[in-house]
Amino acid sequence: MPLLALILLVALIATFGFGETLQALLGAVGFILLLVLILAALIAAGGTWLYRRAKNQVTRR
């Protein structure tokens, strides 16, 4: 279901946000890439936080 919402959002951006077809396609691809980069950064930050937390608990024992 979230994938369907993402595709719908990209279609809306492509339809109403840009005038020409090439700009619409580039805008939609840019949106998806930006979303993927943000998710990757959040996963990396969460993994780093978990790693440091686990490392600190091991050294305390």
Image (cartoon, rainbow, N blue to C red):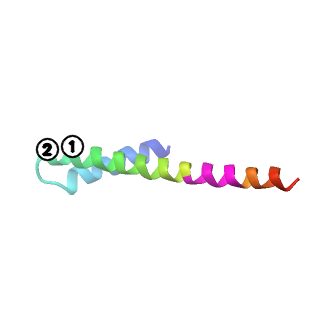
- Direction from residue 7 to residue 46 in the image, left or right: right
Give the distance between the C-alpha atoms of the residues marked 2 and 1, in whole angstroms.
6 Å
Residue at the image point whose x is 72% and y is 55% from the top: 53
Report the amino acid beneath label 1. Answer: Leu
Which residue matches tag 1? 25
* Residue 10 or residue 34, whichever sits in front: 34
Residue 48 is inside the magenta segment = yes
> What x and y, as percent, mark residue 20?
11, 48
Residue at the image point whose x is 35% and y is 45% from the top: 33
> What x and y, as percent, mark residue 40?
48, 47
Under tag 1, what secondary structure? Answer: helix
Q: Is residue 29 above or below residue 38?
A: above
Q: Magenta stretch mostly in which secondary structure?
A: helix
Considering every residue shown, the one lying at the far right of the view is 61
* Residue 22 or residue 41, whichever sits in front: 41
Q: Which mark is residue 33?
A: none
Residue at the image point whose x is 21% and y is 51% from the top: 15
Considering every residue shown, the one lying at the far front of the view is 59
Report the amino acid beneath label 2. Answer: Thr
Under tag 2, what secondary structure? Answer: helix
Q: Which mark is residue 21?
A: 2
The region drawn magenta spans 45-52
> What x and y, as percent, mark residue 12?
28, 52
* CA neighbours of label 2 inside 10 A, class few (<14), some (14 to 19), many (20+): few
